Image (tube, rainbow, N blue to C red):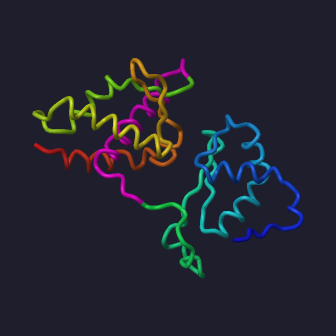
Amino acid sequence: MTTALPTDLPEFHEMGIAAVRLLQGVLYADDKNAWESLLSNESELTDYFTRIGLVLVVDQGDGLAYLRQLDDDQRTHGYDRLPRLFRRTPLGYDATLLCVLLRDEYRRFEDEDLDNERCVVDVDAMFDSWKSFFPADEDEVRLRKKLGTTLKRLDELKFVRRFQEKPEAWEVCRLLKARLPLSELENLRQQLLAEVPA
């Protein structure tokens, strides 16, 4: 097996740092070098990612950027032939519920918490809201385990990250705010309430 490499690599461009960070996941303004490279090369990066069927979303107000697939109605003129880079997997009831609860926490944090830079939720406090969406006779140990599993799933999606072990707390990431705007929040909450088992 041989690996073909060009005899001379193209000249290095700072834009590559931002491109790789975006392919790895969300890029935050805290990553100063990559963020500055993104803003300086936003037009070129937009063109580059569009060629492979991706949309570059940059929210300077919240200091984050991420990639998403072209919507189905945008996949025209041959773009429907591109394989999807990101798999579409439905979140399911538990993950959707936790996203709604955490997005509520983030809204409260933005409206009321003027002292902290991060939205951090205590798992014990979150559990009270979580269990109200399950039957009253549900086993609490099982429900706590389910909450822990769901937090890990959202961690994989970059919606949360562990803040501390004891007492257990998680930071709600700005990406969740971007992916679940307030305009969709109430509608999603009503759908979940309709599914709450008696």
Q: Which secondary structure type mostly characterizes the magenta part of the structure? A: helix
Q: Identify the residue at the far front of this view.
A: 1
Quarter containing the N terminus: bottom right
Q: Identify the residue at the far bottom of this view.
A: 77
Quarter containing the C terminus: top left
Tally of numbered tags: 0
Q: In the visual, does 107 lie left or right of 44?
A: left
**Residue 133 at x, y percent in the picture:** 22, 38
Q: Which residues are magenta?
A: 89-116
**Residue 15 at x, y percent in the picture:** 78, 53
Q: In the visual, does 92 lie left or right of 112?
A: left
Of residues 10 and 45, which is closer to you in this image?
10
**Residue 18 at x, y percent in the picture:** 72, 49
129 up-or-down from 196: above or below: above
Q: Is residue 93 magenta?
A: yes
50 up-or-down from 45: above or below: below
Q: Residue at x 32, y 49 (%)?
A: 188
Q: Is residue 95 magenta?
A: yes
Q: Residue at x 32, y 23 (%)?
A: 125
174 up-or-down from 188: above or below: above
Q: Residue at x 28, y 49 (%)?
A: 93
Q: Residue at x 69, y 37 (%)?
A: 31
Q: In the visual, does 185 lie left or right of 25?
A: left
**Residue 142 at x, y percent in the picture:** 21, 34
